[in-house]
Amino acid sequence: MRREDYRMDRDAALRLLERAPYVHMASTDGEGRPVLRALHAVVCDGWLCFHGAPVGEKCSVLGREAVFSAEEVIAEVPSYWSDPVLACPATTLYLSAHVRGVVDEITVPETRARVLQALMGRFQPEGGHAPVDVADPRYTKQVAGLLVAGVRLDALDGKGKLAQNRTPPKIVALVENLWSRGRDGDARAAALVMRANATVPRPARFVGPEGVALEPAFEDDALPDVCALLRDTYWHAGRSPDADLADAHRASAAWVGARDEHGAVIASARAVSDGVRYAYVADVVVHPAWRGRGVGAAVMTLLLDHPRVRRVSRVELATRDAMAFYAAMGFVETGRAANGAYERVTMALRRG
Ligand SMILES: CC(C)(COP(=O)(O)OP(=O)(O)OC[C@H]1O[C@@H](n2cnc3c(N)ncnc32)[C@H](O)[C@@H]1OP(=O)(O)O)[C@@H](O)C(=O)NCCC(=O)NCCS
Protein backbone atom coordinates (compact mmCIF):
# COMPACT_ATOMS: atom_id res chain seq x y z
CA MET A 1 0.00 0.00 0.00
CA ARG A 2 1.46 3.34 -1.02
CA ARG A 3 1.14 6.36 1.26
CA GLU A 4 -0.32 8.17 -1.74
CA ASP A 5 -3.43 5.96 -1.58
CA TYR A 6 -4.36 7.39 1.80
CA ARG A 7 -3.84 11.01 0.74
CA MET A 8 -6.72 13.36 1.42
CA ASP A 9 -7.26 16.29 -0.92
CA ARG A 10 -6.21 19.71 0.29
CA ASP A 11 -9.76 21.05 0.70
CA ALA A 12 -10.77 18.09 2.84
CA ALA A 13 -7.62 18.54 4.96
CA LEU A 14 -8.45 22.22 5.36
CA ARG A 15 -12.03 21.43 6.42
CA LEU A 16 -10.73 18.97 8.99
CA LEU A 17 -8.43 21.65 10.46
CA GLU A 18 -11.29 24.14 10.45
CA ARG A 19 -13.71 21.92 12.37
CA ALA A 20 -11.15 20.43 14.81
CA PRO A 21 -12.04 21.36 18.40
CA TYR A 22 -8.30 21.88 18.98
CA VAL A 23 -5.03 21.11 17.21
CA HIS A 24 -1.75 19.71 18.49
CA MET A 25 1.50 21.54 17.87
CA ALA A 26 4.79 19.62 18.13
CA SER A 27 8.09 21.49 18.06
CA THR A 28 11.29 21.98 20.05
CA ASP A 29 12.32 24.72 22.46
CA GLY A 30 15.59 26.70 22.57
CA GLU A 31 17.40 23.78 24.20
CA GLY A 32 16.17 21.31 21.62
CA ARG A 33 13.70 19.71 24.02
CA PRO A 34 10.46 18.47 22.51
CA VAL A 35 7.39 20.64 22.98
CA LEU A 36 3.80 19.42 22.52
CA ARG A 37 0.82 21.73 22.97
CA ALA A 38 -2.91 21.51 22.41
CA LEU A 39 -4.16 24.79 20.97
CA HIS A 40 -7.31 26.48 19.81
CA ALA A 41 -6.48 27.52 16.28
CA VAL A 42 -8.23 29.03 13.27
CA VAL A 43 -7.61 29.14 9.57
CA CYS A 44 -7.25 32.80 8.56
CA ASP A 45 -5.68 34.50 5.53
CA GLY A 46 -3.88 31.32 4.42
CA TRP A 47 -2.43 30.68 7.85
CA LEU A 48 -3.25 28.39 10.75
CA CYS A 49 -3.23 30.85 13.64
CA PHE A 50 -3.37 30.78 17.40
CA HIS A 51 -2.78 33.18 20.24
CA GLY A 52 -0.73 32.73 23.34
CA ALA A 53 1.15 34.40 26.16
CA PRO A 54 1.34 38.18 25.92
CA VAL A 55 4.08 39.67 23.78
CA GLY A 56 7.23 40.10 25.86
CA GLU A 57 6.86 36.78 27.65
CA LYS A 58 8.91 33.98 26.25
CA CYS A 59 7.33 31.93 23.48
CA SER A 60 9.63 29.00 23.05
CA VAL A 61 8.55 27.98 19.56
CA LEU A 62 8.61 31.31 17.68
CA GLY A 63 10.88 31.04 14.66
CA ARG A 64 11.07 27.26 14.98
CA GLU A 65 9.94 24.47 12.74
CA ALA A 66 6.71 22.90 14.03
CA VAL A 67 4.07 20.49 12.91
CA PHE A 68 0.39 21.02 13.68
CA SER A 69 -2.11 18.22 13.46
CA ALA A 70 -5.81 17.51 13.82
CA GLU A 71 -7.27 14.02 13.91
CA GLU A 72 -10.73 12.49 13.78
CA VAL A 73 -11.38 8.84 14.66
CA ILE A 74 -13.96 7.50 12.22
CA ALA A 75 -14.45 3.95 13.53
CA GLU A 76 -12.76 1.20 15.44
CA VAL A 77 -12.68 -1.95 13.29
CA PRO A 78 -12.61 -5.12 15.43
CA SER A 79 -10.32 -8.00 14.51
CA TYR A 80 -13.18 -10.54 14.35
CA TRP A 81 -14.71 -8.82 11.31
CA SER A 82 -11.78 -10.20 9.29
CA ASP A 83 -10.30 -13.00 11.39
CA PRO A 84 -12.20 -15.18 13.85
CA VAL A 85 -9.10 -15.96 15.92
CA LEU A 86 -6.20 -13.55 15.52
CA ALA A 87 -6.18 -10.09 17.08
CA CYS A 88 -3.91 -8.47 14.51
CA PRO A 89 -6.51 -7.25 11.98
CA ALA A 90 -7.99 -4.87 14.60
CA THR A 91 -7.53 -1.36 13.29
CA THR A 92 -8.82 2.21 13.36
CA LEU A 93 -10.24 4.25 10.52
CA TYR A 94 -9.30 7.90 10.88
CA LEU A 95 -8.75 11.24 9.19
CA SER A 96 -5.79 13.47 9.96
CA ALA A 97 -4.42 16.77 8.69
CA HIS A 98 -0.91 18.14 9.21
CA VAL A 99 0.71 21.48 8.54
CA ARG A 100 4.44 21.83 8.74
CA GLY A 101 6.29 25.15 8.82
CA VAL A 102 8.06 27.80 10.81
CA VAL A 103 6.00 29.43 13.56
CA ASP A 104 5.92 33.15 12.91
CA GLU A 105 4.52 35.97 14.94
CA ILE A 106 1.80 37.91 13.14
CA THR A 107 2.70 41.56 13.57
CA VAL A 108 0.29 43.51 11.31
CA PRO A 109 -2.34 44.92 13.71
CA GLU A 110 -5.24 44.44 11.23
CA THR A 111 -4.32 40.79 10.74
CA ARG A 112 -3.87 40.26 14.48
CA ALA A 113 -7.34 41.66 15.10
CA ARG A 114 -8.80 39.48 12.32
CA VAL A 115 -7.25 36.37 13.83
CA LEU A 116 -8.53 37.20 17.32
CA GLN A 117 -12.03 37.83 15.94
CA ALA A 118 -11.87 34.58 13.94
CA LEU A 119 -10.93 32.71 17.13
CA MET A 120 -13.92 34.29 18.91
CA GLY A 121 -16.22 33.44 15.99
CA ARG A 122 -15.03 29.85 16.05
CA PHE A 123 -15.00 29.19 19.79
CA GLN A 124 -17.69 31.62 20.99
CA PRO A 125 -20.01 31.57 17.99
CA GLU A 126 -22.91 32.91 20.02
CA GLY A 127 -21.15 36.31 20.13
CA GLY A 128 -21.81 38.29 23.31
CA HIS A 129 -18.88 40.63 22.73
CA ALA A 130 -18.01 43.65 20.61
CA PRO A 131 -16.29 42.45 17.41
CA VAL A 132 -12.51 42.56 17.76
CA ASP A 133 -11.64 45.44 15.46
CA VAL A 134 -8.33 47.20 15.15
CA ALA A 135 -10.18 50.51 14.86
CA ASP A 136 -12.00 49.98 18.17
CA PRO A 137 -9.96 51.76 20.88
CA ARG A 138 -11.27 49.33 23.52
CA TYR A 139 -9.21 46.61 21.85
CA THR A 140 -6.00 48.55 21.22
CA LYS A 141 -4.21 47.12 24.24
CA GLN A 142 -5.21 43.49 23.68
CA VAL A 143 -4.52 43.54 19.96
CA ALA A 144 -1.06 44.97 20.60
CA GLY A 145 -0.35 42.94 23.73
CA LEU A 146 -1.28 39.35 22.92
CA LEU A 147 0.99 37.03 21.06
CA VAL A 148 -0.68 36.12 17.76
CA ALA A 149 1.24 33.56 15.78
CA GLY A 150 0.76 30.93 13.15
CA VAL A 151 2.14 28.87 10.37
CA ARG A 152 1.53 29.25 6.65
CA LEU A 153 -0.72 26.61 5.14
CA ASP A 154 1.73 25.97 2.26
CA ALA A 155 2.74 22.52 3.52
CA LEU A 156 -0.72 21.15 4.34
CA ASP A 157 -1.21 17.44 4.03
CA GLY A 158 -4.10 15.16 4.88
CA LYS A 159 -4.54 11.46 5.36
CA GLY A 160 -7.72 9.41 5.34
CA LYS A 161 -7.18 5.85 6.49
CA LEU A 162 -10.40 4.39 5.16
CA ALA A 163 -9.66 0.79 4.20
CA GLN A 164 -8.06 1.69 0.84
CA ASN A 165 -5.60 -1.18 1.46
CA ARG A 166 -8.35 -3.83 1.46
CA THR A 167 -9.62 -5.94 -1.39
CA PRO A 168 -13.03 -5.01 -2.88
CA PRO A 169 -14.89 -7.90 -1.19
CA LYS A 170 -13.38 -6.91 2.17
CA ILE A 171 -14.37 -3.28 1.66
CA VAL A 172 -17.95 -4.34 0.90
CA ALA A 173 -17.95 -6.55 4.03
CA LEU A 174 -16.57 -3.69 6.13
CA VAL A 175 -19.29 -1.30 4.95
CA GLU A 176 -21.96 -3.90 5.69
CA ASN A 177 -20.49 -4.57 9.14
CA LEU A 178 -20.38 -0.88 10.00
CA TRP A 179 -24.00 -0.43 8.94
CA SER A 180 -25.23 -3.44 10.87
CA ARG A 181 -23.16 -2.69 14.02
CA GLY A 182 -24.61 0.81 13.95
CA ARG A 183 -22.63 2.48 16.74
CA ASP A 184 -22.68 6.26 16.79
CA GLY A 185 -20.66 7.35 13.77
CA ASP A 186 -20.82 3.98 11.98
CA ALA A 187 -23.23 5.23 9.30
CA ARG A 188 -20.83 8.09 8.59
CA ALA A 189 -17.91 5.64 8.59
CA ALA A 190 -19.73 3.50 6.00
CA ALA A 191 -20.30 6.60 3.83
CA LEU A 192 -16.65 7.70 4.09
CA VAL A 193 -15.30 4.23 3.30
CA MET A 194 -17.50 4.05 0.17
CA ARG A 195 -16.42 7.53 -0.89
CA ALA A 196 -12.72 6.75 -0.40
CA ASN A 197 -13.09 3.54 -2.41
CA ALA A 198 -15.35 4.85 -5.15
CA THR A 199 -14.25 2.28 -7.74
CA VAL A 200 -15.35 -0.61 -5.53
CA PRO A 201 -18.97 -1.66 -6.20
CA ARG A 202 -21.23 -0.54 -3.34
CA PRO A 203 -23.17 -3.08 -1.27
CA ALA A 204 -26.62 -3.58 -2.83
CA ARG A 205 -28.40 -1.77 0.02
CA PHE A 206 -26.58 1.43 -0.99
CA VAL A 207 -27.55 1.25 -4.65
CA GLY A 208 -30.88 2.77 -5.64
CA PRO A 209 -32.94 2.59 -8.81
CA GLU A 210 -31.07 3.26 -12.07
CA GLY A 211 -27.80 2.80 -10.16
CA VAL A 212 -28.05 5.93 -8.02
CA ALA A 213 -25.81 5.97 -4.95
CA LEU A 214 -27.74 5.80 -1.67
CA GLU A 215 -25.82 7.61 1.06
CA PRO A 216 -26.00 6.27 4.63
CA ALA A 217 -24.90 9.63 6.05
CA PHE A 218 -24.89 13.07 4.54
CA GLU A 219 -22.75 15.81 6.02
CA ASP A 220 -22.04 19.49 5.49
CA ASP A 221 -20.91 19.25 1.88
CA ALA A 222 -24.43 18.11 0.91
CA LEU A 223 -26.11 21.06 2.64
CA PRO A 224 -26.17 23.61 -0.20
CA ASP A 225 -27.89 21.12 -2.52
CA VAL A 226 -30.26 19.82 0.15
CA CYS A 227 -31.26 23.37 1.15
CA ALA A 228 -31.85 24.18 -2.53
CA LEU A 229 -34.17 21.15 -2.85
CA LEU A 230 -36.08 22.06 0.31
CA ARG A 231 -36.39 25.77 -0.38
CA ASP A 232 -39.22 25.14 -2.85
CA THR A 233 -41.19 22.59 -0.86
CA TYR A 234 -44.66 23.56 0.37
CA TRP A 235 -43.63 23.26 4.03
CA HIS A 236 -40.53 25.46 3.81
CA ALA A 237 -41.27 27.84 0.94
CA GLY A 238 -40.33 31.37 1.95
CA ARG A 239 -40.08 30.68 5.67
CA SER A 240 -37.07 28.56 6.62
CA PRO A 241 -33.69 30.23 6.24
CA ASP A 242 -30.91 27.95 4.97
CA ALA A 243 -29.02 28.39 8.26
CA ASP A 244 -31.98 26.89 10.19
CA LEU A 245 -32.31 24.03 7.71
CA ALA A 246 -28.58 23.36 8.01
CA ASP A 247 -28.71 23.27 11.83
CA ALA A 248 -31.76 20.98 11.77
CA HIS A 249 -30.05 18.53 9.43
CA ARG A 250 -26.78 18.53 11.37
CA ALA A 251 -28.65 17.84 14.62
CA SER A 252 -30.71 14.95 13.22
CA ALA A 253 -29.86 11.45 14.44
CA ALA A 254 -30.16 10.12 10.88
CA TRP A 255 -29.66 12.02 7.63
CA VAL A 256 -29.53 9.98 4.45
CA GLY A 257 -29.88 10.71 0.76
CA ALA A 258 -29.01 9.87 -2.82
CA ARG A 259 -26.56 11.13 -5.44
CA ASP A 260 -26.60 10.72 -9.19
CA GLU A 261 -23.68 9.30 -11.20
CA HIS A 262 -21.94 12.70 -11.14
CA GLY A 263 -22.18 12.98 -7.37
CA ALA A 264 -24.98 15.58 -7.39
CA VAL A 265 -27.47 15.35 -4.53
CA ILE A 266 -30.84 14.14 -5.85
CA ALA A 267 -32.66 13.20 -2.64
CA SER A 268 -32.52 13.68 1.11
CA ALA A 269 -34.43 12.60 4.22
CA ARG A 270 -33.75 12.90 7.93
CA ALA A 271 -35.08 11.69 11.26
CA VAL A 272 -34.82 12.89 14.83
CA SER A 273 -34.81 9.86 17.08
CA ASP A 274 -34.19 8.54 20.58
CA GLY A 275 -33.01 5.32 18.95
CA VAL A 276 -35.53 3.07 20.73
CA ARG A 277 -39.04 4.38 21.35
CA TYR A 278 -39.69 7.34 19.11
CA ALA A 279 -38.51 8.92 15.88
CA TYR A 280 -39.87 11.66 13.66
CA VAL A 281 -39.18 11.70 9.92
CA ALA A 282 -38.86 15.08 8.20
CA ASP A 283 -37.71 16.84 5.05
CA VAL A 284 -38.16 13.93 2.65
CA VAL A 285 -37.45 15.30 -0.80
CA VAL A 286 -36.44 14.07 -4.25
CA HIS A 287 -35.15 16.32 -7.05
CA PRO A 288 -38.07 17.05 -9.43
CA ALA A 289 -36.24 15.42 -12.35
CA TRP A 290 -35.93 12.18 -10.38
CA ARG A 291 -39.45 11.90 -8.97
CA GLY A 292 -41.54 8.85 -9.79
CA ARG A 293 -38.48 6.65 -10.41
CA GLY A 294 -38.32 4.87 -7.06
CA VAL A 295 -35.65 7.08 -5.48
CA GLY A 296 -37.94 8.40 -2.71
CA ALA A 297 -38.97 4.88 -1.67
CA ALA A 298 -35.32 3.73 -1.69
CA VAL A 299 -34.21 6.67 0.46
CA MET A 300 -37.06 6.12 2.93
CA THR A 301 -36.22 2.40 3.15
CA LEU A 302 -32.63 3.34 3.97
CA LEU A 303 -33.76 5.90 6.57
CA LEU A 304 -36.04 3.38 8.30
CA ASP A 305 -33.13 0.91 8.41
CA HIS A 306 -30.65 3.51 9.71
CA PRO A 307 -28.96 2.37 12.94
CA ARG A 308 -30.63 5.20 14.89
CA VAL A 309 -34.09 4.40 13.50
CA ARG A 310 -34.24 0.64 12.85
CA ARG A 311 -35.06 -0.34 16.46
CA VAL A 312 -37.57 2.46 17.03
CA SER A 313 -41.05 1.22 17.93
CA ARG A 314 -42.99 4.29 16.74
CA VAL A 315 -41.95 6.44 13.79
CA GLU A 316 -44.09 9.48 13.00
CA LEU A 317 -44.33 12.02 10.22
CA ALA A 318 -46.72 14.54 8.71
CA THR A 319 -47.63 15.14 5.08
CA ARG A 320 -50.05 17.05 2.90
CA ASP A 321 -50.54 14.58 0.06
CA ALA A 322 -47.97 11.78 0.07
CA MET A 323 -50.07 9.41 2.19
CA ALA A 324 -49.97 6.60 -0.39
CA PHE A 325 -46.18 6.92 -0.64
CA TYR A 326 -45.78 6.34 3.12
CA ALA A 327 -48.64 3.83 3.41
CA ALA A 328 -46.68 1.49 1.13
CA MET A 329 -44.00 1.40 3.86
CA GLY A 330 -46.47 0.57 6.61
CA PHE A 331 -47.36 4.04 7.88
CA VAL A 332 -51.01 4.53 8.86
CA GLU A 333 -52.92 7.76 9.18
CA THR A 334 -53.29 8.98 12.79
CA GLY A 335 -54.96 12.37 12.37
CA ARG A 336 -55.79 15.39 10.26
CA ALA A 337 -55.63 19.06 11.18
CA ALA A 338 -55.79 22.36 9.34
CA ASN A 339 -52.32 23.83 8.95
CA GLY A 340 -52.66 27.25 7.34
CA ALA A 341 -53.09 26.74 3.61
CA TYR A 342 -53.38 22.96 3.71
CA GLU A 343 -54.59 20.00 5.71
CA ARG A 344 -51.82 18.24 7.59
CA VAL A 345 -52.07 14.48 7.79
CA THR A 346 -50.12 12.77 10.55
CA MET A 347 -48.99 9.18 10.08
CA ALA A 348 -47.22 6.61 12.22
CA LEU A 349 -45.35 3.37 11.69
CA ARG A 350 -45.57 1.00 14.66
CA ARG A 351 -43.04 -1.80 15.03
CA GLY A 352 -42.35 -4.50 17.59
C1 LIG B 1 -42.93 12.49 -2.22
C2 LIG B 1 -41.59 12.17 -2.85
C3 LIG B 1 -40.51 12.24 -1.77
C4 LIG B 1 -41.66 10.78 -3.41
O1 LIG B 1 -40.44 10.43 -4.01
P1 LIG B 1 -40.41 9.71 -5.44
O2 LIG B 1 -39.02 9.35 -5.73
O3 LIG B 1 -41.11 10.57 -6.40
O4 LIG B 1 -41.28 8.43 -5.12
P2 LIG B 1 -41.11 6.97 -5.71
O5 LIG B 1 -40.84 7.06 -7.17
O6 LIG B 1 -40.13 6.24 -4.90
O7 LIG B 1 -42.57 6.42 -5.48
C5 LIG B 1 -42.84 5.29 -4.71
C6 LIG B 1 -44.34 5.08 -4.72
O8 LIG B 1 -44.99 6.16 -4.03
C7 LIG B 1 -45.92 6.78 -4.92
N1 LIG B 1 -45.85 8.21 -4.68
C8 LIG B 1 -44.80 9.01 -4.88
N2 LIG B 1 -45.11 10.27 -4.53
C9 LIG B 1 -46.39 10.26 -4.11
C10 LIG B 1 -47.24 11.25 -3.63
N3 LIG B 1 -46.88 12.53 -3.50
N4 LIG B 1 -48.51 10.87 -3.30
C11 LIG B 1 -48.89 9.61 -3.39
N5 LIG B 1 -48.10 8.61 -3.85
C12 LIG B 1 -46.86 8.94 -4.20
C13 LIG B 1 -45.46 6.44 -6.31
O9 LIG B 1 -46.52 6.51 -7.22
C14 LIG B 1 -44.92 5.06 -6.14
O10 LIG B 1 -45.96 4.14 -6.13
P3 LIG B 1 -45.81 2.73 -6.88
O11 LIG B 1 -44.69 2.01 -6.16
O12 LIG B 1 -47.14 2.11 -6.71
O13 LIG B 1 -45.46 3.06 -8.29
C15 LIG B 1 -41.22 13.15 -4.00
O14 LIG B 1 -42.21 13.08 -4.97
C16 LIG B 1 -41.03 14.57 -3.60
O15 LIG B 1 -39.91 14.97 -3.30
N6 LIG B 1 -42.11 15.39 -3.58
C17 LIG B 1 -42.02 16.76 -3.20
C18 LIG B 1 -41.69 16.88 -1.74
C19 LIG B 1 -42.66 16.12 -0.88
O16 LIG B 1 -43.86 16.22 -1.03
N7 LIG B 1 -42.10 15.36 0.07
C20 LIG B 1 -42.86 14.56 1.02
C21 LIG B 1 -43.24 15.41 2.14
S1 LIG B 1 -44.12 14.52 3.38
Image (tube, helix red, strand yellow):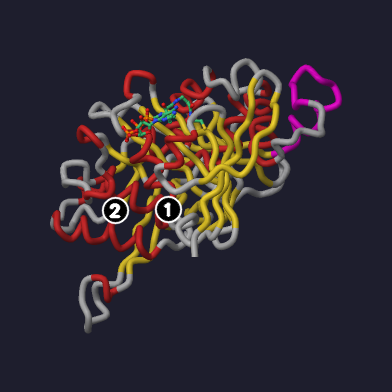
The answer to whether the beta carbon of the residue marked 2 is less than 8 Å from any atom of ligand 1 is no
User: Which of disc 2 and disc 1 is earlier in sequence?
Assistant: 2
Say if mark 1 contacts mark 2, CB within 8 Å: no
Foreground: disc 1 or disc 2 = 1
Residue 351 rendering spot, x and y as whole percentages = 49, 60
| Residue with the mark numbered 1 | 306
Question: What number is the disc on residue 47?
Answer: none
| Residue 98 in sight from this viewpoint | no
Residue 45 rendering spot, x and y as whole percentages = 52, 25
Q: Secondary structure at mark 2?
A: loop
What amino acid type is highlighted by mark number 1?
His
Residue at 48% x, 34% y: name it: 284
Q: Secondary structure at mark 1?
A: loop
| Residue with the mark numbered 2 | 162
Residue 218 rendering spot, x and y as whole percentages = 43, 40
Q: Nearer the viewer, residue 293 or 227?
A: 293
| Residue 201 in sight from this viewpoint | yes
Report the image quarter containing ligand 1: top left
Residue at 55% x, 48% y: name it: 348
In the rendered image, residue 279 lying in the magenta stretch gets the answer: no
- How far apart marks 1 and 2 lie (CA) works out to 21 Å
Quarter of the figure that contains the N terminus: bottom left
What amino acid type is highlighted by mark number 2?
Leu
Residue at 32% x, 24% y: name it: 290
